[in-house]
Image: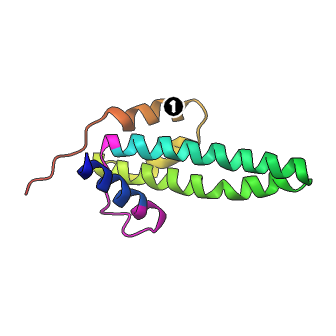
Amino acid sequence: MKKLSNSIKDSFMNIVFVKDRTQTKISRIVFLIINMLNQFISFLCVAFGLLIYNLNGAGLVYGYLILILPLWIGVHSIIYRLNDIGNNRWLTLLMFVPIINFGFFLYLLFVPGKSVSK
């Protein structure tokens, strides 16, 4: 469990503070956990924007500006997962196609990564 926790922390830090997008890989479980955390962060950003919107009229603008962080995390986690599978990173653009993105997320979640020989 400690190894998984360290793996999640390292992967999250690699995503936020971009190290090397071409070599970084994340496993299926780490991908799932990071995306669940990312959804929670997105929810908090929207809630924060709505809260400020009720206080003054510019809150939605702030909420949407804060949503740049979850978008950044989401795109980079997909890039790292595609590196693990061995696919082209340009497939990340499929996450912006409305119906295809759900199937693509399931694909990323269930396809095993390539084994690395030591």
Q: Is residue 2 left or right of residue 81?
A: left
Count of numbered circles on the image: 1
| Crowdedness near tag 1: few (<14), some (14–19) or many (≥20) residues, C-alpha within 10 Å | few
Asked if residue 22 is among those painted magenta in the image, a careful observer would answer yes
Between 23 and 32, the one nearer to me in the picture: 32
Q: Residue at x 45, y 35 (%)?
A: 104
Residue 27, position as x, y percentages in the image:
30, 46
Residue 12, position as x, y percentages in the image:
42, 57
Q: Quadrant of the N terminus?
A: top left
Asked if residue 103 is among those painted magenta in the image, a careful observer would answer no
Badge 1 marks a residue whose secondary structure is helix
Residue 66, position as x, y percentages in the image:
68, 57
| Magenta stretch: helix, strand or loop mostly | loop
Outermost residue to the right: 57
Q: Is residue 98 left or right of residue 102?
A: right
Between 77 and 103, the one nearer to me in the picture: 77
Which amino acid, mark 1?
A: Phe
Q: Quadrant of the C terminus?
A: bottom left
Q: Residue at x 46, y 56 (%)?
A: 76
Q: Which residues are magenta?
A: 13-29
Name above or below for residue 13 compared with residue 4.
below
Between 69 and 117, the one nearer to me in the picture: 69
Residue 34, position as x, y percentages in the image:
44, 47
Name above or below for residue 32 compared with residue 73.
above
The residue carrying mark 1 is 102
